[in-house]
Image (cartoon, helix red, strand yellow):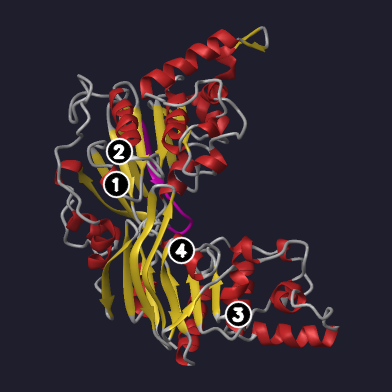
Amino acid sequence: MTFAVTSLSKVYGGTAALSSVDLEVRPGEIVGLVGTNGAGKSTLIKILSGAAKPSSGTLSFDGRSLSFAGPLDAQAAGVQTVHQNIDDGVVFGATVAENLTLDSLAGGGGAPGWFQTRARVRAAASAVAPGLGLPLDAPVETLPAGARQQIVIARALSRRARLLILDEPTSTLSAVEADALVARVKQAAATGVAVLYVSHRLSEIETLCDRVVVLRDGRVVRTFTAPPDRAAIVTAMLGPVAATEPGSAPRPPGAEVGGPAREVLVAEGVRAVPGGREFGLRVRAGEVLGVTGLVGAGKTELLEQLAGARPLLSGRLLLDGAPYRPTDPRAAIEAGVAFAAEERAAQAVVPGWSVRAHVTLPWLRAHSRAGLLAPRSETAAARRVADLFGVRGPGIEAPIEALSGGNQQKVVVGRWLEGTPRLLLLDEPFRGVDVGARADIGRVVREHAREMGVVVASCDPQELIGLADRVLVLHEGGPAGELPVAETTAERLAALMSGTGEGVPA
């Protein structure tokens, strides 16, 4: 049965996450769904799996309209979803066997007996070639993430799915495990299951999918038939990338690229991810280095190593010419390295704390007298940041969640400038931020880059145009190439980000 969505839209507040999306997945067909962060993939999956309701549009199987009150309704209709966050699909405190048979445990009518449970477990385990091979009586939380993911996938494949949705299913699997999963997905499609396959690994998309649908800004912008062109897919994902003058925000005097400037950071022989290629990079004072790549390319991992949030995998670092190897974020801060993490809500803000408290959090010693916080000093710092970035809201004593997302991000970035760092690391600083807030953040960072080096990571290279001087492109954990912003075009970026950049001069 063909599964279809027609004119599907989803609006949150005044923001359209999806706009008039049309999509079909036919029986036995594997359709790839790709797009950058914020393209609308997660919203579409939530609607298809019954976790969210569309604002308008229809879902249907063979022309028969569907309406899901929740995920159980979607499962009853034959839609099985394996979400990217695997721990959402397992129950900690339960065994592997119990997690494989959650449906029967939740279905009422009493718990099945031991022999019945084992029979159901064997059926679920056999759904994943060549079988799970996991200790059935082990608590699921004792298993590594890849093993937990296999459990969730096995449970989904063992159900009678008409539409199987896989969201980044190989993100935590080894190469052998990923190959086995891909083989099982092909087997499922061969039995008539319709498969929607979401992945940032374009090599999988290229070899597995019959069609590839590209989402950008909540819309379907292009559909490719097999065999798809990987570079063309990336070009469609990115949209137009203008080759503008390097840096639309004014550079401070003396910070011109190529002029005399100290090397703030020198990295030699580093690796972004385990198994990735070693590479080096240099960042000078007065310079902004942009780092981009598809999701999973290693941008966050690289910045977290530089910030002491994860151990350095290899190589050595020099900070202003001195050896630098932070053991934790506090050591990095004391060395003069500031880091604004990717996930603002989970990694950068404390619910209930005021704007003032967030500004001074990394610098409590500087705002303390005789071991006690000095309110006047804290207040002055918070006001400086609010004025510098144009923070709008109910005031510096208000809880940070009272501010809009863009103004929260201004506080998160701005507090690091209070400490005059030598190296400023910004991971996806514009995610969930409106155009005005992006301009404010970019302007201030550019203006304050004279005495420090800045590294900005973003999966959307358009965000780096007008801010960075150079763009380093990562692909599957290694360097794909580096471009001066003045020479950055959509075609060159697409070739490098997709790993097909051979012959493209850097």
Residue 75 position within the rendered picture, expressed as x and y whole percent measured from the top left: 59, 77
Q: Is residue 454 above or below residue 111?
A: above
Q: Which residues are magenta?
A: 264-278
Q: What separation in Å lies between label 3 and label 2 (alpha carbons)?
A: 50 Å
Residue 325 position within the rendered picture, expressed as x and y whole percent measured from the top left: 50, 35
Residue underneath mark 1:
472
At horizontal 46% and vertical 54% (from top left) the residue drawn is 273
417 or 32, which is in the foreground? 32
Q: What separation in Å lies between label 2 and label 4 (alpha carbons)?
A: 40 Å
For marks 2 and 1, the one nearer the N-term is 2
At horizontal 69% and vertical 64% (from top left) the residue drawn is 143
Q: Quadrant of residue 55?
A: bottom left
For marks 1 and 3, the one nearer the N-term is 3
Residue underneath mark 3:
76
Q: Secondary structure at mark 4?
A: loop
Q: Amino acid at mark 1?
A: Leu
Residue underneath mark 2:
289
Q: Secondary structure at mark 1?
A: strand
